[in-house]
Amino acid sequence: MKVKQFLVLPNLPERIQRLRELAMNLWFSWNWNIVKLFIRIDSELWEKTYQNPIEMLAYLPQAKLEEVAQDEAFLANLDRVYADFQEYLKAKRWFETAFPQHKDCKVAYFSCEYGIDTGLPIYSGGLGILSGDHLKAASDLGVPLVAVGLLYRYGYFRQFLSADGWQQERYEENDWYHMPVTLEKDEKGNPIKFTIDFSGTPVYVQIWKVMVGIIPLYLLDTNIPDNSSKYREITSVLYSGDKDTRLRQEILLGIGGVKALKTLGIKPAVYHLNEGHSMFLLLERIRSLIESDHLTFQEAVQMVWPTTVFTSHTPVPAGNETFDPKLLEPYLKTYVESFGMTWEQFLSLGRVFPANENEPFCMTVAALKLSAFNNGVSKLHGKVTREMWHHLWPNLPSEEVPIKSITNGVHLRSWLSHDMVDLFDTYFGPKFTRQPAAFENWEMVQKIPDAELWRVHQRRRERLVFFGRKRLKSQLTRRGASSFDVKMAEEVLDPQVLTIGFARRFSSYKRAFLLFKDVNRLRKLIGNPQMPVQIVMAGKAHPLDNPGKEIIKHILQVASQDEFRRKIIFLEDYDINIARYLVQGVDVWLNNPRRPQEASGTSGMKAAINGAVNVSILDGWWCEGYSPETGFKIGNGEEYDNPEYQDMLENQFLFDVLEREVIPLFYERNGINLPYKWVTMMKNSIVMAGKQFSSLRMVKDYSNMFYVPAIQAHDKFVQNNYAPAKSVAHWVNDLSARWDKIDIENIETPSMDISPKVGDRIPVTMRVALGEISPDDVTVEVLAGNLNSLEQMSNCESVVAAKLDGDVHLPSGQYLYKTEVVCKESGRFGIAGRVMPRNENLIHNRIPKLIKWW
């Protein structure tokens, strides 16, 4: 049977056509005034359509649309909001002011998921939410970003729980014609398509666009009649458990993403890989440079390397995506060989130890090797990542491995409650939360009267309680619970009681179970009539993660006991909407991962900006956010080899800090029943989060540290038909051929019979044989650092040595270098010398095989 397709749009009266324009730009996800327009039309339908304004407009009766179009008060408000929208689109922004010469350059941002708003469910958790916040901040700042992802037919699963607490999954098909996405079409009105080869089969891909403020997000879709069912399923489900499908998705994201931008006529200067899923884009960039610009393989690599940013979010080796070479071969062998790369070269690119044929191909390893700009997502995670991938730079101390840290941040306007925004606007004006650069302004929060801040927070806790009751009642009704249990759902939680929130992916290392390991102690904590406590939890386990599902089941079984059922609730189907109610309404945000397995974590930042107080393990972002004035720590940052012992110990630490510090502080009141000390900590928490953990700060860091230097490298390397890229490629090849002949023959220092004192300067002279290498092509350095019992150095500091000219009589190719090392502190120290490559066109000189030590 053949079916002719056509699309019927809602018949919006002319006067309210602007509603659709507002609904088609996800700026509404961080503009409460737009949201209020739709709530005013039909608040019940707004919630029923998952806060998706396009779907809501489609389901509104025509009579209601006509009625709205005649409402003069509504129309006046619509005109004001639309004027604000136009002003936002046209405003001059930070990036254009700071870097006017680069405002037209494009940075392509690739991520496998984007969590922008509830009504566009193409995300699963933290990585997607971070990607969404990155785009929103880029829009606010005017960073010239274009984003690329996949359009998942079913997205991530919707969660529901059985009567015994076991997680079940349901996949709902997304209707793109009722969502804020548009299909890219050519001038004739036909969908723009391109093909990508999968094992000799051309697969057709169409492109959808989402506008996130001023940032376009392009989403790739293979679910079209041109393809067989096998390939239509590529963009079916986010994070498929099938490895073959995962590989096809990542080929589509990486190789297909580059092809999509080229098809649209977009020529990025810089590419940013948000995690390793999109690593194959680097191969496509190399292939394109070889075939279209006639570069050699090495020249293409030298063009790609300084213009690529790679962000890792994974703190453990097992969390990095790997593929068996046998799985890769049918899809990629012919592809890589087509541009002169052997299969062995390709596999070695993704291996820490290229000669190990049993080592799988790791996407992170390949991305690190082909990216000059690499980072972890917190200071601790940067350190963990440098140590994890130290083997890729075996001749460097781990602290010098070229992986930096840019700590994650959250988009404040997306996560601040509208009550809190109104409070800030009242005291500081409407520009307060919109000023991208004015992080110091957050200190003004200290001037808000304690009673007013507390009143706003109490209102948000009340809304969380009423929302929790409504959701729990719906959950129990669906499960077929007794009328008694359904009725009891209307009585759970108390709007006046200290409320602890815990919500995140239910992976074992995040330890949602920690508070439930000692049920007797939990019973005493919850049941204290003088200082009562209640807990609201939410989160999903991956469909294949049975240990994670067991954790949920155990918590549900405890929460169903009589003494807990009114005080502990678990909200099904954790999403952005539930997250907002939680972070905006709880008093305490609990986070207890196994350190150092939390790369960053951002939910605690969202809670902090709303005045919640964090109680957390010192891991991820909390290592930077914690102080005794801003929240509480569980333990002192210890790391353990025995996870069972760690869980037992930190369970005790958690109860101790809750019983002895957190709960008594919350219930300490003054004469007007105000928890004045707690409110002081709330203010400190808001200031800390606003100043340090905004996504505006994060994206400014990416721009200053990575994007702009990479754009500058691009602009330099493309000059004169890629002459600088070609020059560097030939220089590296030439230097590599001669590098082994370098020899640091001697390092001389004064006699150490009398130990130097703090502040003394130790002269160091080095004799270096460079052979045929010019001194202009190297940097000679002295490295000084603390020495341990194994004579290994740490906390190293490098000092460049100067070549001595004049009356220095040495054999040809030998040179003397001299410098001084300052003794800055007491202790046992060591000195070492090394030779590094030097070229003004290098982003950095940490090239693994071009480091020579004494």
Image: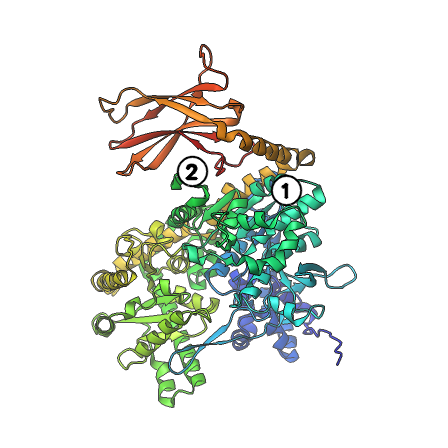
Q: Which residue is tagged 2?
A: 395
Tell me if I can see residue 97 in this picture: no
- Give how far apart the Cα atoms at labels 1 and 2 are: 26 Å
Which of the two discs, 1 and 2, labels the residue nearer the N terminus?
1
Q: Amino acid under label 2?
A: Asn
Residue reaching furthest to the bottom:
483
* Whole-percent x, y for residue 358 in the image: 48, 55
Going 41% across and 59% down the picture, which residue do you hit?
606
- The residue nearer to you, when weighing 554 against 772, is 772
Tell me if I can see residue 509 in this picture: yes
| Image quadrant assignment for residue 75 | bottom right
Colour approach in the figure: rainbow
Q: Which residue is tagged 1?
A: 297
Could you classify mark 2 by the number of other residues whose Cα lies within 10 Å: few (under 14), some (14-19), or many (20 or more)? some
- The residue nearer to you, when weighing 676 against 571, is 571
Helix, strand or loop at mark 1: helix
- The residue nearer to you, when weighing 447 against 539, is 539
Q: Is residue 357 found left or right of 821 in the rendered image?
A: right
Dots 1 and 2: beta carbons under 8 Å? no
* Whole-percent x, y for residue 16 in the image: 65, 68
Helix, strand or loop at mark 2: loop
Q: Amino acid under label 1?
A: Phe
Query: Which numbered marker is on residue 307?
Result: none
* Whole-percent x, y for residue 173 in the image: 58, 74
| Image quadrant assignment for residue 235 | bottom right
Q: What is the tally of numbered marks visible in this picture?
A: 2
Going 35% across and 51% down the picture, which residue do you hit?
625
* Whole-percent x, y for residue 263 in the image: 70, 54
Q: Taking 584 as reference, is 748 above or below it?
A: above
Report the quarter where the N terminus lies: bottom right
Q: Taking 184 as reference, is 104 above or below it?
A: above
